[in-house]
Image (tube, helix red, strand yellow):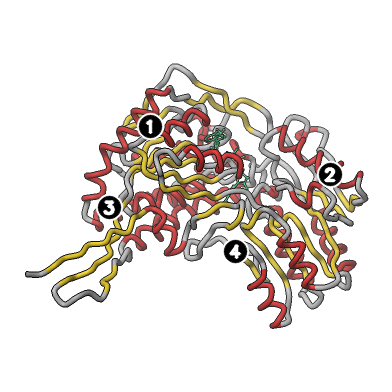
Amino acid sequence: MTESINNVKKDLYINGEWVQPSDYKELINPATNQVIADIAQATEQHVEDAIQAAYNAFKPWKALELKERTAYLHKIADLLEENADRLAEIMTIEQGKPLKESRLEVLSGAESFRWNAEEARRLYGETIPAPNDHKYEIVYEPIGVVGAITPWNFPSGMITRKIAPALAAGNTVILKPSGDTPLSALAIFELFEQAGLPKGVANIIMGSSKEIGEAFTSSKLVKKITFTGSTPIGKALYAQSADTLKKISLELGGHAPFIVHEDADVTAAVEGLMAAKFRNNGQVCIAPNRIFVHESVKADFLSQLTEKVEALKVGNGLEENTNVGPLIREDAIDKIKKQIVNATDKGATLVTGGHRLKGEEYDKGFFFQPTILDHVNMTMDIFYEETFGPVIPIITFTSLDEAIEMANDSEYGLASYAYAKDGSAINKLGRSLEYGMVGINSVAISNPETPFGGVKQSGFGRENSHLGIKEYVTAKFVNTKFE
Ligand code: NAP
């Protein structure tokens, strides 16, 4: 076991104290299937304590001078940068992604804190034209206690992009990270403590996700739920929040189309696809999952793509030459295998990959070959079901309208991508793709400055950008009459 894992706290952090419950649960490394830590599991009382602590901390945190509040956020950003190597190692060991990706994720978290500290200073209200003896104003105020629930695929990034705007706007938070990746979250909370964040402003609890979700949604003290994860769990939390009428933001599943038009720069499209698809081994809500290629460029595209996919080195993310790590769990492999069998039974052909990796280092972890499937069509499960793994399904098209129609034939609406040169084709793609984000000739759609979020069954709400912080405030109208 490495020092970084040994040194990180494994307890609950409630009201500025590390709390040790009686129950701890084993955590495994997906690259080795070995136990790496025992993680604290909260009781119902711990969850209530955390909610109460966040509630008590809200008024003084909200009342803090903006300059003082944002100084904490800048301090946290500094600490994330200083500790990026250690946090990256922790993330790779618990989640599997290559170290380089983990490090970039930690640094993007530092950027989230800086960006939102700045945005808090620009939460301008408005003055509305009013009768002469009146003043109409809109002022933005924090909501209160925020319950945040995050997934395992970005064990650090999904947390920082929620907690940074929530705290910047003056809210307090209780985080429940994924049970598969709590160590990255705990390491961030150690930095919150080092930054001197006042007690109760940020709390972390691990344990039964169902019970914690119910405690958050039924609590009258929690005013907002922010969730990133699967669509079914997001819907359940939405339904559970109805009774207490909470504000809620839902960043849910995706099944991104990637269109390669007949005039596309094929080499650039292959590069874009490789970067977006194999980041975190395809376990990304915005990973391209349905690749629509014009018949005239298909042979060239497939040949360039196959060469690159076959050159990928799959392995333990701690090793320097690894491009692609393991999948998160055994059931992730089962899901991919099922989609591949279903597709090949219905006529798809395996161009490369298709199987679990075996032998030596691969035997213990959850490693799968990077895979290309050709001749995929709409009768196959993989066309409609989120993939979350290293599988590239190729669908051939003859007209752009047909490709756009197929691309929009999805219950999801998070990310979409297209490569094209013709101006009217680009315009049509930008306007017609029914997704929250469209990347044209670029796969870089997640930045602190730009809005991230979906439509349809991919949820609602936006993270990052100037819109992100607005998810954590209410607009208050003040009407003042002058005598
Ligand atoms: P998940 O199973 O929905 O879990 C997400 C979080 O919800 C975890 O913390 C999980 O805790 C918790 N949870 C599970 N059941 C719950 C319940 N009944 N009540 C309250 N919380 C509950 O999703 P995942 O497998 O971790 O993540 C993958 C999914 O996230 C994919 O669908 C992906 O597309 C989506 N995602 C979306 C975005 C986006 O921005 N739109 C970004 C990343 C990922 P435990 O793990 O401890 O059970």
The residue positioned 79% from the left and 54% from the top of the image is: 392
Which residue is tagged 2? 340
* Upstream in sequence: badge 1 or badge 4: 1
* Upstream in sequence: badge 1 or badge 2: 1
CA–CA distance between discs 1 and 4? 36 Å
Q: Kindly tell me whether residue 89 is visible in this rendering.
A: no
Amino acid type, mark 2: Ile
CA–CA distance between discs 3 and 1? 20 Å
The residue positioned 72% from the left and 42% from the top of the image is: 315
Position of the C terminus by quadrant: bottom left
The residue positioned 19% from the left and 75% from the top of the image is: 131
Relative height, residue 414 to residue 151 (above, below): below
Q: Where is residue 365, by image quadrant? A: top right
* Upstream in sequence: badge 3 or badge 4: 3
Relative height, residue 140 to residue 321 (above, below): below
Name the secondary structure under disc 4: strand
Amino acid type, mark 4: Met
Which residue is tagged 1? 13
Name the secondary structure under disc 1: strand
* Upstream in sequence: badge 2 or badge 3: 3
Q: Which mark is residue 69?
A: 3
Q: Which mark is residue 73?
A: none
* Upstream in sequence: badge 3 or badge 1: 1
Relative height, residue 216 to residue 270 (above, below): above
The residue positioned 91% from the left and 47% from the top of the image is: 346
**Which mark's residue is nearer the viewer, 3 or 4?**
4
Which residue is tagged 4? 437
